[in-house]
């Protein structure tokens, strides 16, 4: 739709310039000028959210490295900038300078596109996170009734990029990484979706804003504790951080699907990973911990606090746990998480019916 | 019962027996049945006029150690059918000392690259000749005396 | 359907091969059909190098065998040479040797524990292991002047005495080492993820152990109570009180438990050594200064010792000159590593890293 | 040996949490690493660093060359005017002194061990990085000096 509006406005400008006045000045009953105003606002919001996402990633990478250094009794990065704050910037510059190697035998187009397929959904995911409850500028770029579906759809796109990257590299380790990625996605996505559906049933809406509003009295983590556990584990698996870092699994498959990547393409994989960690933390905060709901502080602050707590938990999980074997992960996904999520679905359906009966 | 040629002792008190090379397999088999169940190592020694193969045995039950030696001109029966661990030790002995083991399943070089010229632990090995190794496209090592073709 | 098996080369450049091991693995999906280790990438022929110089010169090559437990390697060499030359070693020197060897055994096992954690995907315990090892290395720095390759043991004793400051450092170290070790160990041992990964993985039966000549912690983890320190005591191991840990399972988890317990036992030995160490000479004066280049020996000798990896010994032949005629190193990792094909067959790729690291191969020693 | 109890699934998951807690607590402990160029490590007295030679007491006996395992030490002709007192006590008539290639020195300490007059010592001088190959072989005169005296703070 955005593209259509964009083309329309360009066409409008051209025609206006040529003093041709036979185009209709209204579209869908509104004057074109209003559409253009909306367009500008939308573009600005998209850029803003993109920048916010990037800032969150930068901060997260910094915190990750510092926190990892902390728990490992090290100092961590402290050379670039005050306390090493600009380390990531330096790293990005280093990555950009590096030669961008595409292996001779790789599938060129797929190999080059794969990092963007992984990275784009992460940024798009940030578009539907309700960052605040201010009515006009709620920092939510697109607010429509099916934001959760949108989110889920984009979350499931990213593994496709990993698989493409792994298969196109023409390397046996990458191949194994891609295969593991595929198997792992199967294992965690079904329970994840079912546990999301339970939230939707309880809230009675697919909209993230409605889900947050529905948690005004009581956050969904209390009735949906099982669903929360399933979703949390699925999010860990989706980020492929330990204990579920099978597609990358440093000590077994060298670097899994990203073995052959170098330079900025590898950097994009890396940033996508951290971007998703931030996104997953916000999604968990929105779904189960009442998003912006909270006393005293404004809503945005609450959401960021909740998100930050989950990011730290993810980081702690990352640095402290070992890796499971691939069959153990599949066992966990199909034998435990799926039944648990179905039980959770039943509970929340019953709860929803009961509540509709009461009110 | 295979008789031994002569018997001495190491300085550390371990019994050493000399066995004719034709009987070495039979002798070791008997010792294995007798209780010397672990083969610690096989090695070869170059005495300039002849080669010797040395087997170090250990009994895990009685803690006894036994060194079996045999004089050879470069070929001796393999004991891989008695001990699986003998495989690598025999390959190493072939690699470094140049003693051939009959009936060995996979008698290739183990530490040096395949195609290396000479056996380094022989006393007449030319130390001044450098050999260069490189990895071929098929994943096998290439050896040459030319320093442009390897490292 | 013939082309079901994929052949993958693990190494020599691979994050979890502990150096330069290369394993040709035939894989059917995730399952290992066949694994063939290929070694020799770190080959320097220490045996030939040792045969080219006098007896004391060969010691630096021994350091570079198992470079994470260099003291143990030195000990094996000097014991063999002393046996060959009938050297009397002063009592204090022997106690000092025991002290440094046991400390180094702990350091070696700590390296193993950290890298094993990395292979299992745990990033953090690695640093704790390094932190603890660093304290031991500081002690070595104080005693010997070096941190990794010491060249500390001489024929007839040791090169320098243990200083009071070093003793203080050791006392301070041992006061909280076991607690810290238990803390690190609990990160592994109590975690279900770790246990599920390692239980029943990389199994070696008793028969395989004997057939391959596997020694050391791997042997003890398969239910064989063998330890050279107990069976044929050298130094004063018969005068200290320690136990030999044994497990029956023969899998990676059992090896983990055995090594953890060995560290505790070694710490126990260290504290006993400090109590019992007498005053006196640390060096046999007969073999000092100019004698060092004129040491001559005749005969053959083999003295088994217990290195952190298993039974280590030097089979040495002297021909009456000051240069050893033949030096053969019985390296435990070499024999232990040869059991890899049996150990890996039928397990998954993820078990490969677990099993390989449970051998604790050090390639200076395997390739020599 | 105490019998270790193998955790089952439930105790094991509690163990996972406990392990995480252990690691979480480590985050509040002091750092053990050092900021290296600013904070220098302290080296014990005995540190076997670079070879130092006291030219006055060297008698040119070549024992160090004989014991050196890898040819680091080589005797070179070198003229040095010893003072009367030292010349009487430690004569070096052949005028040969050891030179050391620090790039291949293994710091094995054998030369210090064997030196009959104590002229060769290994001291706690560890920063011996060079950018030029020709600088790595130290003459007897250079062996008497510290690195800072030889090359200054910033070496080429």
Image (cartoon, coloured by chain):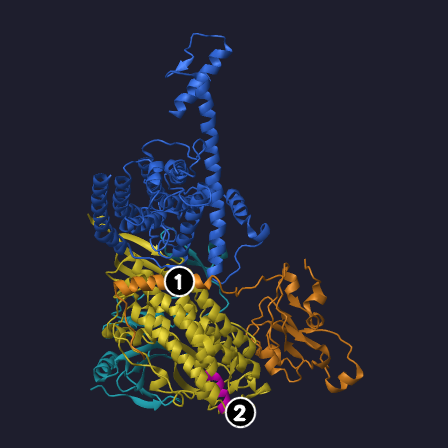
Q: Nearer the viewer, mark 1 or mark 2?
A: 1
The correct choice, above or below, for D14 with respect to B9 in the image is above
Whether residue A169 is visible, yes or no, is: no
Chain letter, blue in picture: A
Residue C306 point in image, percent of width and height = 38, 80
Whether residue A136 is visible, yes or no, is: yes
Asked where in the image residue A123 lies, by quadrant, the reply is top left
Asked where in the image residue D11 lies, by quadrant, the reply is bottom left
Q: Is residue C94 magenta?
A: yes
Q: Report the quarter where the N terminus of chain B lies.
A: bottom left
Residue C357 point in image, percent of width and height = 36, 65
Q: Main secondary structure of the magenta part?
A: helix
Asked where in the image residue C108 lies, by quadrant, the reply is bottom left
The correct choice, above or below, for C273 with respect to C198 in the image is below
C-alpha span from label 1 to label 2 = 46 Å
Please name the residue shown 54% across and 44% down the image.
Answer: A93
Q: Which residue is mark 2?
A: C279
Q: Tell me the shade of chain C.
A: yellow
Give the number of marks.
2
Chain letter, orange in picture: D
- What span is in magenta? C91-98
Chain letter, cyan in picture: B
């Amino acid at each position: 739709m955005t593209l259509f509006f964009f083309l329309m406005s360009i066409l409008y400008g051209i025609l206006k310039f040529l003093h041709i006045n036979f185009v209709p000045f209204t579209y869908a009953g509104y004057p074109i000028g209003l559409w253009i105003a909306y367009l500008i606002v939308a573009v600005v919001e998209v850029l803003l959210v993109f920048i916010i996402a990037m800032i969150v990633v930068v901060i997260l990478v910094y915190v990750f490295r510092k926190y990892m250094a902390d728990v490992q009794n090290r100092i961590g990065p402290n050379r670039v900038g005050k306390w090493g704050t600009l380390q990531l910037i330096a790293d990005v510059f280093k990555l950009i300078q590096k030669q961008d190697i595409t292996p001779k035998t790789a599938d060129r187009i797929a190999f080059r596109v794969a990092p963007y397929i992984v990275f784009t959904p992460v940024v798009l995911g940030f578009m539907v996170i309700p960052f605040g409850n201010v009515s006009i500028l709620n920092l939510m770029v697109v607010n429509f009734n099916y934001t959760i579906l949108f989110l889920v759809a984009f979350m499931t796109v990213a593994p496709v990029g990993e698989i493409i990257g792994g298969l196109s590299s023409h390397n046996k380790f990458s191949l194994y990484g891609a295969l593991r990625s595929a198997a792992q996605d199967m294992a965690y996505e079904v329970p994840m979706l079912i546990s999301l559906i339970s939230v939707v049933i309880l809230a009675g809406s697919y909209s993230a804003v409605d889900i947050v509003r529905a948690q005004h009295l009581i956050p969904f983590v209390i009735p949906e504790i099982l669903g929360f556990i399933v979703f949390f584990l699925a999010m860990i698996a989706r980020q492929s951080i330990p204990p579920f870092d099978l597609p990358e699994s440093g000590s077994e498959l060298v670097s899994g699907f990203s073995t052959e990547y170098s330079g900025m393409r590898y950097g994009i994989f890396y940033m996508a990973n951290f971007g998703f960690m931030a996104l997953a933390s916000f999604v968990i905060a929105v779904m189960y911990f009442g998003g912006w709901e909270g006393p005293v502080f404004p809503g945005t602050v609450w959401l960021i606090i909740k998100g930050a707590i989950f990011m730290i938990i993810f980081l702690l999980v990352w640095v402290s746990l070992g890796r499971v074997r691939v069959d153990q992960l599949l066992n966990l996904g199909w034998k435990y998480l799926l039944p648990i999520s179905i039980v959770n679905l039943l509970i929340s359906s019953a709860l929803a019916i009961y509540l509709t009966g009461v009110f | 019962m295979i008789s031994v040629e002569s018997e001495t002792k190491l300085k550390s008190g371990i019994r050493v027996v000399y066995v004719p090379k034709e009987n070495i397999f039979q002798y070791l088999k008997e010792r294995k049945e007798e209780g010397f169940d672990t083969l610690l190592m096989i090695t070869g020694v170059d005495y300039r006029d002849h080669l010797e193969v040395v087997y170090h045995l250990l009994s895990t039950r009685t803690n006894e150690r036994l060194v079996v030696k045999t004089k050879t001109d470069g070929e001796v029966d393999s004991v891989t059918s008695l001990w699986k661990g003998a495989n690598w030790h025999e390959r190493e002995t072939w690699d470094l000392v140049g003693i051939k083991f009959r009936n060995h399943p996979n008698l290739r070089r183990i530490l040096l690259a395949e195609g290396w010229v000479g056996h380094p632990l022989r006393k007449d090995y030319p130390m001044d000749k450098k050999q260069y190794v490189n990895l071929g496209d098929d994943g096998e090592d290439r050896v040459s005396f030319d320093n442009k073709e390897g490292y | 359907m013939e082309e079901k098996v994929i052949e993958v080369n693990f190494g020599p450049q691979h994050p979890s091969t502990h150096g330069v091991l290369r394993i040709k693995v035939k894989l059917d999906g995730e399952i290992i059909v066949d694994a063939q280790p290929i070694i020799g990438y770190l080959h320097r022929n220490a045996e030939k190098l040792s045969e080219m110089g006098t007896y004391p010169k060969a010691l630096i090559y021994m350091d570079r065998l198992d470079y994470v437990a260099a003291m143990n390697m030195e000990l094996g060499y000097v014991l063999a040479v002393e046996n060959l030359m009938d050297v009397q070693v002063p009592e204090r020197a022997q106690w000092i040797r025991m002290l440094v060897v046991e400390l180094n055994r702990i350091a070696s096992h700590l390296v193993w524990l950290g890298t094993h954690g990395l292979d299992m995907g745990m990033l953090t315990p690695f640093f704790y292991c390094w932190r603890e090892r660093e304290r031991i290395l500081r002690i070595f720095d104080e005693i010997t002047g070096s941190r990794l390759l010491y060249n500390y043991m001489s024929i007839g004793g040791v090169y320098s005495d243990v200083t009071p400051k070093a003793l203080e450092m050791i006392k301070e170290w041992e006061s909280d080492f076991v607690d810290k070790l238990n803390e690190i160990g609990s990160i592994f041992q109590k975690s279900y993820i770790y246990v599920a990964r390692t239980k029943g993985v990389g199994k070696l039966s008793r028969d395989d152990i004997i057939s391959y000549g596997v020694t050391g912690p791997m042997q003890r983890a398969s239910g064989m109570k063998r330890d050279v320190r107990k069976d044929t005591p050298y130094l004063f191991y018969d005068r200290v009180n320690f136990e030999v840990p044994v497990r029956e399972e023969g899998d990676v988890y059992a090896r983990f438990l055995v090594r953890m317990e060995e560290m505790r036992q070694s710490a126990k030995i260290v504290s006993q050594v400090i109590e019992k160490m007498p005053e006196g000479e640390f060096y046999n004066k007969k073999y000092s200064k100019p004698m060092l280049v004129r040491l001559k020996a005749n005969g053959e000798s083999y003295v088994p010792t217990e290195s952190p990896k298993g039974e280590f010994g030097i089979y040495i032949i002297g021909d009456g000159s000051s240069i050893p005629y033949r030096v053969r190193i019985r390296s435990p990792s070499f024999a232990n590593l040869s059991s890899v094909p049996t150990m890996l067959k039928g397990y998954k790729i993820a078990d490969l890293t677990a099993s390989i690291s449970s051998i604790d191969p050090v390639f200076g020693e395997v390739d020599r | 040996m105490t019998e270790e109890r193998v955790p089952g699934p439930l105790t094991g998951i509690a163990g996972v949490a406990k392990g995480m807690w252990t690691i979480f607590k480590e985050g509040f402990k002091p750092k053990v690493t050092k900021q290296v160029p600013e904070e220098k490590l302290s080296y014990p007295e005995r540190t076997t660093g670079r070879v130092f030679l006291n030219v006055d007491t060297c008698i040119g006996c070549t024992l160090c060359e004989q014991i050196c395992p890898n040819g680091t030490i080589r005797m070179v002709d070198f003229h040095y005017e010893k003072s009367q007192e030292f010349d009487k006590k430690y004569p070096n008539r052949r005028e040969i002194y050891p030179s050391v290639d620090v790039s291949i020195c293994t710091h094995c300490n054998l030369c210090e061990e064997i030196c009959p007059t104590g002229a060769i010592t290994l001291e706690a001088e560890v920063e011996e990085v060079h950018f030029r190959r020709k600088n790595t072989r130290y003459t007897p005169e250079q062996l008497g000096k510290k690195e800072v005296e030889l090359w200054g703070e910033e070496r080429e």
